[in-house]
Image (cartoon, grey):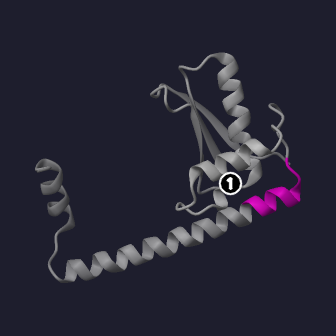
Amino acid sequence: MTFDYNVVYRDMPTTIRSFVRANPDASFTIIINARLSYEDRLARYRHEVQHIKNGDFDYDREDPADAIEANAHASTPAPILNQTLSDAEIQSALARIRKRRKQFDKKWARLQRRAKIKEQLGHDFFAAEETRRLNPD
């Protein structure tokens, strides 16, 4: 069984070389800076696939990115083409994604409850946000 991912090339600032995002359907999207050379894009692809393989999406947002990157660089690079994972690895990755999705759903439900309370109290979120964006002072 193969691991599902998409690769997208985008013009980005040169300080951003690549990153990977988990999708709700348990696939991943690898975004690579199109301004990089072919060799650099290939290296970034390998790097991002290694993040997927390592399960780096288990980290909390508070975890330092340096720790995640250090962990990624400590392991060996993944093969470039025909990336396949065992069923156990796929199930493990799916379990981690489901766990993160559950945490996200809990946070979203909490925000929805807060919004409902503020709406009942007469707070207009859209008007407040519009005012804040139009008058940044």
Q: Residue at x 57, y 60 (%)?
A: 63
Q: Is 112 part of what is drawn in magenta? A: no
Residue 114: x and y, percent? 32, 78
Residue furthest top as drawn: 37
In the rendered structure, the answer to whether residue 116 lies left or right of residue 9 reads: left
In the rendered structure, the answer to whether residue 15 lies left or right of residue 57 reads: left
Q: Nearer the viewer, residue 127 or 39?
A: 39
Q: Measured along the vertical axis of the image, is residue 13 above or below residue 104?
A: above
Q: Nearer the viewer, residue 12 or 112?
A: 12
Give the tally of numbered discs: 1
| Residue located beneath label 1 in the image | 56
> What amino acid is found at the position of numbered circle 1 in the picture?
Asp
Q: Is mark 1 on a helix, strand or loop?
A: helix
Q: Measured along the vertical axis of the image, is residue 47 above or below residue 128?
A: above
Q: Is 90 part of what is drawn in magenta? A: yes
- How would you rate the neighbour count of disc 1 (Cα within 10 Å): few for under 14, some for 14-19, many for 20 or more? some
Give the prevailing secondary structure in the magenta stretch.
Answer: helix
Q: Which residue is drawn at 46% across and 72% down?
A: 107
Q: Which residue is drawn at 29% across and 75% down?
A: 115
Q: Residue at x 57, y 55 (%)?
A: 64
Q: What stretch is highlighted in magenta?
A: 85-93
Residue 55: x and y, percent? 72, 55
Residue 9: x and y, percent? 56, 28
Q: Measured along the vertical axis of the image, is residue 43 above or below residue 1?
A: above
Residue 57: x and y, percent? 64, 56
